[in-house]
Image (tube, helix red, strand yellow):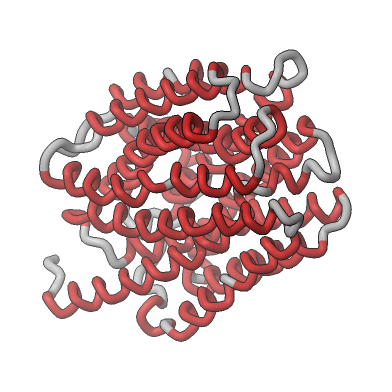
Amino acid sequence: MPVSTSETKKNKARLLILYLLGLLLAISGAIPAYIQSNFLEQFVSVRTVSLFFAIANCLSVAAILLFPALIKNLGNYFLTKVTAALYLAALLGLTIADGPNIALISTILFSVTSNLIWINMDILVESFSDNRATGRIRTAYFTAINLGWIMSPLFSAYLISRGQYTLSFLIAAFMVAPFYLILVSQRRKLKDRIEYKSEALPETIKKMWRNRNLRGIFFVALLLSLFYSAAVIYVPLRLFQDLGMSWDTLGWIFSVMLVPFVLIEIPAGVIADKYLGEKEILFAGFAIIVISLLLFYRIATPNAWLWAAVLFASRVGAALVESMRETYFFKIVDADEVGYINIFRTTGPLGYIIGAGLGVLILSFFPLHYLFLFFALILLAGFGFIASIKDTK
């Protein structure tokens, strides 16, 4: 049934609100992201940091798999408010962590809630999206999110260079307040309007596995998340611990490297919608990521400009893959299919589990930089999964 012009205008207004919420949530999540591993290293070894991340993400996967039933019974809008409150509690816990126990509990809660709240946001955005414009809508949404990520590392690094981990987490928590206020004030526009489908988890997994396109894009997303685990957990350790680069330097490098997410994703979404489809762009993105990981492994100099260039290139590849991951998946899945959406979003924590597990294993036998070589070899599998899916054009 065609959507009326007035409803289309209302949906555009709702999407603008959601873009703003995504920006605020991203700023809140980005401030702690690149400092977590170094924060935890104050209390435990690098190998134990990997174990912390593995535990947190295992519990995140379990929570995500239980989420569809909660969404069906309680509604997505209500759960968004609950998850946001728990997310705030996790950040406040990190501000008072003075030992491994509180740090671990807060890290786990932060991991779980940060994964769940983005699922809530996915469903909200998809509820007001037109499939014909999925590429443009999803990439505009992710561009808003990535603006938040660009704004945060420089500020966060400035605080960390002065020993202010606590203040960083506190400011991240403070950013949740406007998110929550806007969410509550816009209840009439954002409240649930559809009946969510829910079926047994094994049946959903079976259906997803039998669908070649869903299976292929699932593994593409998983491999992208594996790359992100390397980028978030191990690149800061490599540059700060191994190469002795200062946080003042890392701050501007990390901000520069995230610029491609803002510049590239919307054009990529338009091209996918109107011209190419997704596969060609996915192939190009994966090629750039694999080459970048090999350079992470080979470069042993603390030259800031060289690392800025390589990290920037790696995010060009990641931006291409991320934009097409979102575009492709949400072209073939609707907002009411929460089972598929939740399983798809397990790729985030699963990638971190695999990355942290590899970290524990490989660091037992090799220096830190060898991790990037292993990640590059694993990501070569992405080309096979891309080839297996049917393009939308």
Residue 35: image x %, image y %?
66, 48
Q: Say which of 189 and 136 sits in front.
A: 136
Q: Is residue 325 left or right of residue 148?
A: left
Report the quarter where the C terminus lies. Answer: top left
Q: Is residue 389 left or right of residue 354?
A: left
- The residue that appears at 30% across and 31% down in the rendered structure is 282
- The residue that appears at 48% across and 49% down in the rendered structure is 255
Q: State whether residue 107 is above or below residue 184.
A: above
Q: Say which of 17 and 335 sits in front.
A: 17
Residue 122: image x %, image y %?
41, 58
Question: Does any portion of residue 3 appear in the rendered image?
Answer: yes
- The residue that appears at 18% across and 37% down in the rendered structure is 277
Image quadrant where residue 50 sits: top right
Question: Does any portion of residue 119 appear in the rendered image?
Answer: no
Image quadrant where residue 96 sits: bottom right
Image quadrant where residue 303 sits: top right
Q: Is residue 6 left or right of residue 372?
A: left
Residue 284: image x %, image y %?
29, 27
Q: State whether residue 154 is above or below residue 48.
A: below
Report the quarter where the N terminus lies. Answer: bottom left
Q: State whether residue 345 is above or below residue 338.
A: above
Q: Say which of 332 and 393 sits in front.
A: 393
Q: Is residue 290 left or right of residue 303?
A: left
Residue 343: image x %, image y %?
48, 44
Q: How many marks?
A: 0
- The residue that appears at 77% across and 18% down in the rendered structure is 364
Q: State whether residue 373 is above or below residue 142.
A: above
